[in-house]
Amino acid sequence: MPKKHKTSDNKKSILLNWLLWAPLKFTGLFAALIIPLLLLMNFLFSIQLFDISYIISVIGILFISAFSVYKIIHWTPKTPLDRKSFIMLNTAQNLISLTLLAIIGFMSIYIYKLTNFNMAIITSTIFGLLTIFFIANGILKIKGLCRRGRAQNIPSWKLWMSIPLGISLFWYSGFLLPDNKKITPVLKTRVKAFDTLISWIIKKPINTIIAFLFSVTVGGIMMANNINAMIVFYIISLLLMLFLLGWKKLQNNLGKGYATVAVLLNFIAIIGILFVLIHTPKQTMVANEQIQIVEVK
């Protein structure tokens, strides 16, 4: 009995690590590394070494970002996620994202109205730390998708090659498709109401579909800039749902055709974005010059 209790507590602490401790450590690490870089940039800028300042800032930010991402990935477990654990983790992460977005959005408006310098500095610092925590939560969302993908026998290289724009396809398969065999959940929570909700979602296919449609609706509202884009996103999500739930061959071979499509979509999307960026006309800055109109007689 004591051994079982210890295991249960460990699973609860693992969920807390995903949601709180790892993002907090990422935030602290990133802030601790970025502050000296900003001080160095300020010094180089003050002595007018602009080119050197730019080069060092780019290299520094890239290194700090890569190192922080590497650390947060290794601060969280590599254990594949069963369906209940994945839905529990992903739902909690989405709730955290929504909460942070609301707070960050409010603070971004509030900062411009501050007249007290010290208050503005404090508020801006909190704003920056919350933004870093939000990014950490997003990184762990991607890792969660990868861990769920591994539980569904999707090759690791296909998961990584689908990042960042194709990985979302694995949310559909991870959320909708049950495990092939009964698995003891990797993650647990002390919040009974939340555990009851997750258990309800996976209990029946109709419950899963309802939760899926709700998640897609919320995601569409957050991501889409207009009603037409939201409708397109919703239709695509419904089609994917029908394919996944109705095509048994696809369910049994997610690591083949489905994962390959995710990788191809990722590359196509990246190439498309780069093409648009390269061929977008650069805006020319017009100097504020005084224009005199001379009347010709």
Image: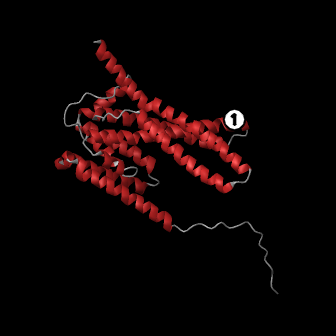
Q: How many marks?
A: 1
Q: Position of residue 31 (x, y in %)?
A: 57, 37
Q: Is residue 1 above or below residue 236?
A: above
Asked whether residue 88 appears in the rendered view, the answer is: yes
Q: Please, which residue is most extreme toward the right here?
A: 297
Q: Residue visible at 32% across and 26% down?
A: 196
State which quarter of the image contains the N terminus.
top left
Which quadrant: the C terminus? bottom right
Question: Is residue 270 left or right of 118 when viewed as pictured?
Answer: left
| Residue sitting farthest toward the bottom | 297
Residue sitting nearer the eye, 11 or 120: 11
Q: Is residue 245 left or right of residue 197?
A: left
Question: With 218 as the anchor, is 60 left or right in this view?
Answer: right
Q: Quadrant of residue 187?
A: top left
Judged from this view, the residue extending furthest toward the top is: 1
Residue 57's spot in the image, x, y percent?
60, 49
CA neighbours of label 1 inside 10 A, class few (<14), some (14 to 19), many (20+):
few
Q: Position of residue 55 (x, y in %)?
A: 60, 54
| Figure colour scheme | secondary structure
Q: Residue at x 62, y 68 (%)?
A: 284
Amino acid beneath label 1: Met
- The residue where tag 1 is placed is 119
| Residue 172: quadrant of the picture | top left
For residue 109, above or below residue 267 = above
